[in-house]
Image: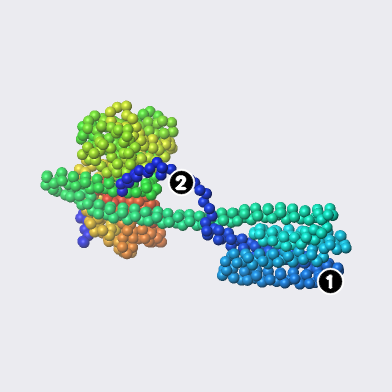
Amino acid sequence: MAATAPQPPTVVPSVVPAAQAQPPAATAPGPSAEARERAALDQVTALYRQSVYRWLGGAGFAGLLAWSLAMIDARSAWLWLAIKATVLAGELANAWAWHRGAATRLAPAVWRRRHGLGSTLDGLGWGLVALWFLPSVDGWRDGLLVAGLLGIASLGMFSLSAVSAHAVRFMAGALGPLVLTQVPRWPEPDALVMGVGILIYMAVVALQGRRTEARQVELLRLRFDNARMLAQLEQALAAARESDATKTRFLATVSHELRTPLNGVTGLTQLLQLEPHLPGQVPRLTALRQSADHLHLLINDVLDLARSEFGRLALAPVPTALAPLVQGIAALLHGVAHDKGLTLQLRLQPGLPDCVAVDPARLRQILLNLLGNALKFTPQGEVSLTVAREGDWLQFVVQDGGPGVPPAERERIFEAFAQGQAAHHSAQPGSGLGLTIARELAHAMGGGLACVDSPAPGARFELRLPCRPAPTPCAPPAEPPAEPHAEPPAQAHAPLTQAPTARAGADILVAEDNAVNAEITLALLDHLGHRGQWVPDGYHALQALRERAQQGQRMYDLVLMDGQMPLLDGWQATRQWRAQEAAAPDGRPRLPIVALTASALPGDRELALLAGMDDLLAKPFTREALAQLLDHWLPAAHG
C-alpha cells in the first residue's frame, strides 16, 4: 500500500643548541606574596586572641600581688596596681578596636606595632615589682615574688608565641629589673646564681621562641599557598569539565549535522536503486552508493577519533560466541577477496573458548579494518586471519601478501592521517584513520595492536585482547551495525527485489522534522510492504496517538520517533505517551517506539531507553537495517 509522502597542523620541530637545551637549575618555589600577607594577618590575629590569657591571668595575679605588697608599702602597692590597670586598659582598648573591624582599615604591621607597644609596657609594669619591692627583709616573701615573676614571664611567652619579638620584649621587661636588683649583690653566691640563671633562662626561651615562630610562619604560608593552589586546581577542574562538556556538545552537533544530509544522500540512492532504471544507470548508482558509504565511513572514523581523544570511546562487553563472530567477518569479506582473485583464509586454532566477554561491534570494527587493508594491498595470493589463545590472551593475526611495511614505518602508520608507502601507490589510499582508531579501540579493550615482523612476504598485524571466558551458552553475534566501520563489500549494494521481512501490512507512525528524511523513510516502508504516516514533530505525534486511542481506532503497530524536533522533541513525546499508557484503565499493550537519531553518540541509546523508547536506529540507515529492525519488533506488535 502506498505510503503517505510528505510535502514539502603540521608541527615542525625546532633545533635547540646544546647549550640552551639544558634544563634550568631547579629552584624551590618560595611563598607567594599573597601567602606572606595572609600569614602576617594570621599572626596578628593569633596575637590578639592569645593575649586574652595573659590579660586575664595577669589581672588576677596583679590584684592578689597588690594586696600582699600593701602589707609592706601600701602606697607603692596601690600605685603599682594603678599603673598596671592603666596599661591593661590601653591594651584592651586597642584589642576592642581591632575586634570591631578597624583591622580591615589598617595594615597588619600597624596592629602588630600597637600590640608590641602594649605588651612591652605590660612587661615593664611587672618589672616594677622587682625595682620597688626587692630585696625586702622577708626572704620567704622575696622568693614568692621571684617565682611569681617567672610564672608571669612564662605565661607571656605562651600568649605571645605568635611573634617571638613581642615575647622577648615582654620577658625582658618583666625579668630584666629582677636581674638588675641582684647586680649589687653579685659577690654573694646566691645573687650570682639567680642573676645568671635568669639570663640563661631568658636566652633559651628567646631562642626557642624564634624557632617556634619561624615554624609557625612557614606552616601558615604553606597552608595559604596550598589553599591557593587548591583553588586554582578546582578552577582548572571546572574549566576542564566545561571543556569536556563543550567537546561533547561539539560531537553531538557535528554528528547530527553530518549524518542528517548524509541520510538523505544514501536514502535517495537506495530508492533510485529500487526503482526501474536504464541499464547504463546501474553502475552509476552503484558508484554513487559506494561513494556515500565511503563518506559515511569517513565520518564515523573522524567521530571515533574525536571520541578517543576526548576519552569517550564507548565499550559494551557482552558474552559473545567467538567462532561465529570471526566466521561472519570472513564471510562478509569473502566476496571482496573473490572479486580480486584472492583467497581469504580463516584459521581457528584449538583451545579457543566458545564464549568470551567482549564488545562484538568493536572487535568486528578492528578486524574489518585490518582485513580490509590486507585485501586492499594484496595484489595476488592469500590473506589470512588466525585466531589463537595464548594463556590469558586472545591473539588475532592478520597476514597479507602485499609489499609489507618497512620497520621504520611500523609505528608511524598508527598515527592519525599517516600512511605507509604502499598506501600512496594504492588506487584507494584511504583516510589514514583506520589503524589509529583500531589501536585506540584495542587499548580501550585492555589489549594492544602492532605491526610485527612477518615470516612471509607481506605485512603482519597482531591484535591481542584479554581472554575473558563467559558462561556458555551465549548469544550468537549480532549482525553488523547499520553504520559501517569498514569498507562494505560491493555485493552489499546490489538492488534487492524482495523484502527480507516476512511480515507486511503494519501501520507505522513516522515522526521526523526533516522532510527529505521522512520521504525516504516512508518510501522504504512502502517498499517493505508497510503503511507509513508522517508527522513533523513530537507534538503532532502525540496528537496522532491520542486521537486513535480516544476514538477507539486500531493503534499504530510501531512508531519511528526522531530525537531532536521542534515544538516537542522525541524524548519528551515518548515520556508523555508512556505516562498515558500507564494511566490508561483498559490496560492497553505497550506500543513499540524506536528512536531515530543522527548523532549516534555512546549515550544516545541510554537516553532513548530512559525516555521509554525500546530501540534505536542511527542515521543514515540502510533498507536492510530498517527491515531487520521491523522484523524484530513487528512480531511483538502483531502478536
Q: What residue type is labelled 1?
A: Ala
Residue 94 percent across, percent down from the top left: 65, 70
* Label 2 or label 1, whichever comes before in sequence order: 2
Nearest the viewer among 239 and 45 is 45
- Few, some or many residues within 10 Å of mark 1 (<14, 14–19, 20+): some
The residue tagged 2 is: 24
The percent coordinates of residue 36 (x first, y second) are 55, 58
**Callout 2 crowding tier (Cα within 10 Å): few <14, some 14–19, many ≥20:** few
| Total numbered circles | 2
State the residue lying farthest toward the right. Answer: 137
Locate residue 470, reporting x and y percent. 43, 37
Q: What element carries label 2?
A: loop
Q: In this view, does 350 lie to the left or right of 334?
A: right
Report how far apart the C-alphas of labels 2 and 1 lie in the structure: 73 Å
> Which residue shows up at 58% across the image and 61% down it?
40
The one of 181 and 256 positioned closer to us in this rendering: 181
* Residue 505, percent from left and from top: 25, 52
Residue 549 or residue 71, whichever sits in front: 71
Q: Taking 206 as reference, is 74 above or below it?
A: below
Q: Quadrant of residue 534?
A: bottom left
Q: Which residue is drawn at 57% across and 56% down?
A: 221
**Residue receiving disc 1:** 74
- Residue 332 falls left or right of residue 281: right
* The label number, if any, that marks residue 175 in the structure image: none
In this view of the protein, can residue 69 be seen by the observer? yes
